[in-house]
Amino acid sequence: MLETRLTKLLKIKYPIIQGAMAWIADSSLASSVSNAGGLGVIAGANAPVEKVREEIRKTKMLTDKPFAVNIMLMSENAEELARVVVEEKVPVVTTGAGNPGKYIPMWKAAGIKVIPVVPSVALAVRMERAGADAVITEGTEAGGHIGEITTLCLLPQVKDSVNIPVIAAGGIGDGRGLSACLMLGAEGVQIGTRFLVAHECNVHENYKQKVIASKDIDTSVTGRPTGHPVRSIRNKLTRRFQELEKSCEAIESFEELGRGALARAAVQGDVEYGSVMAGQIAGLVSKEQSCREIIDEIIQEAYRTLREITLKYMR
């Protein structure tokens, strides 16, 4: 058992949180991760509120372990989801794309642990002051919507600025990554891309195979002119986005091109004109496994890496 303040806080066996992937992270994936000793997460995103409620209830039937719901604060349904997690007695909430400060008192009163994703030191400090239980520092290596600072640079700076547990995200896919983050001061990691190819992940098989086939240089960032850059695997859609950027097209052109693109890839399996969001670690992912196999492999490799480092350099 790899015990940190995070595992004690969340009552989980291993310091691993599954990333909240819109159109992908459902009750099947979340419950499987939780049953394997991590913290599974249901993605709220822009899903209908009652659909999210249904996934919460399914998860409770599939596991008796803690799990989380992620709320994207820029989504139209954020206010309703903020109340649903209270009504459904969800143990943990993670948030992204905004400041959850106005909801934190309500969540804390309901006994919910609150863990915002932060792209900067300043927001991490604000979240601690607002009552967050921990923060997830997400580097630009991550898949989906990203910031600009790398995990290697952001993590230690946030660690030095707050007293609550810090969770690293972005570019982490194995035990070596977990070990490195622990050495940099993290008390847990959030992993998304590796879980895309889990047997229990219901993303389209074409999406899984696109991730497995990818190499180290196969992701790109598009959409910077909109203020909401996204990392995904290169395909015909990303090339079209890049053409729009070069021609300095209006923001509306980007929005039109991106509308429904994630669902096209994740649900319909269109991996050429859909958005195959994945992190830079995708080149490290080479096979489909169960969530338990993924987590067990990561933890065993972390133990081995930490032991080897200790024997080699700490004599």
Image (spheres, rainbow, N blue to C red):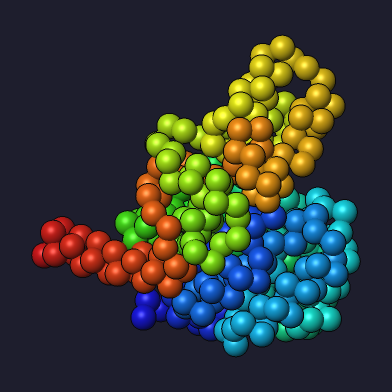
Query: Is residue 32 among the parts visible in the rendering?
Result: yes
- Whether residue 129 is visible, yes or no, is no
Look at 37% across and 57% down and name the residue there: 174
Q: At which x and y percent is residue 286? A: 37, 50
Image coords of residue 216 (percent x, y)? 40, 36
Q: Nearer the viewer, residue 269 or 156?
A: 269
**Residue 243 in the image: x percent, y percent?**
66, 17
Q: Residue at x 55, y 46 (%)?
A: 206
Which residue lies at the image location 13% right of the left edge and 59% below the top edge?
Answer: 312
- Image coords of residue 207 (percent x, y): 56, 46
Q: In the picture provided, is 20 more to the left or to the right than 163? A: right
Does residue 237 appear to the left or right of 292 in the view shown?
Answer: right
Image quadrant of residue 229?
top right
Quadrant of res 45:
bottom right
Q: If the image is split into quadrants, where does the C terminus sit?
A: bottom left
**Total numbered badges shown on the rendered structure:** 0
Q: Is residue 154 above or below residue 128?
A: above
Q: Is residue 244 above or below residue 15?
A: above
Identify which residue is drawn at 43% across, 32% down. 217
Position above or below: 104 against 278: below
- Toward which corner of the image does residue 148 lie, by quadrant? top right
Q: Residue furthest top?
A: 247
* Residue closest to the far left: 315
Q: Where, quadrant-wise, is the N terminus in this rendering?
A: bottom left
